[in-house]
Image (cartoon, rainbow, N blue to C red):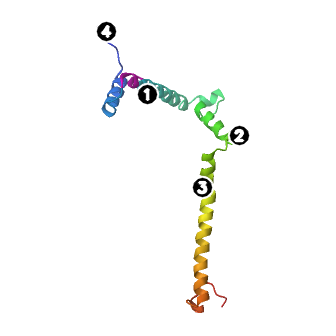
Amino acid sequence: MSVAKVSLAEVEVETKFECKMPELSKAEKELLLRKHEMTMKLRNEFIKQSTNPHRHALGEGGYVFDTGLARHQAMNVSHYEHFRPTGHAFRWGFGVVAVPIILYAWALHAERSAREEKYRNGEVAYKDRRFKFI
């Protein structure tokens, strides 16, 4: 019978996962633990590099180069080059741009037509009209 050595952080993480997600299988828990371990390694490396007081001597400047952030920014820049017009994109663009303009024009026309009809039928006196010349 062998006893596996487990660090205190892994035990805390494992018990945290067990309390919140008891229905996870052992493989899923191990995956979450590996992901958490990798996250903590990357976090500690970032803190180590960003708090290095001699970083300016290396000629790298005062920032830490993050490859994930660089990939994200490159994706944002080239987003329009890789755009494919699909039905979903058309509906989304039409709903965001054209539909509000059409609804606003319809509401404006309906309100002005109703007001003009009241003016022409004599229901509103000239002194009570909103836009008059005198």
Observer-side mark, 2 or 4, equals 2
For marks 2 and 4, the one nearer the N-term is 4
Task: Give the CA separation, mark 1 to mark 4.
Answer: 25 Å
Is the residue marked by circle 1 packed among few (<14), some (14-19), or many (20+) residues within 10 Å? some
Is the residue marked by circle 3 packed among few (<14), some (14-19), or many (20+) residues within 10 Å? few
User: Which mark is on residue 81?
Assistant: 2
For marks 3 and 1, the one nearer the N-term is 1
Answer with left or right where residue 1 lies relative to residue 80.
Answer: left
Main SS class of the magenta portion in the image? helix
Q: Which amino acid does label 3 sit on?
A: Val
Q: Pointer 4: what residue?
A: 2
For marks 1 and 4, the one nearer the N-term is 4
Residue 68, compared with residue 125, is above or below; it is: above
Q: Which quadrant would the C terminus be assigned to in this image? A: bottom right
Observer-side mark, 4 or 3, equals 3
State the SS at label 2.
loop
Tell me where residue 64 appears, x and y as whole percent.
59, 32
Q: What residue type is labelled 2?
A: Glu
Is the residue marked by circle 4 packed among few (<14), some (14-19), or many (20+) residues within 10 Å? few
Q: Pointer 3: what residue?
A: 96
**Residue 10 on the magenta segment:** no
User: Which mark is on residue 36?
Assistant: 1
Q: What residue type is labelled 1?
A: His
Q: Residue at 60% of width from left, 72% of height from top?
A: 108
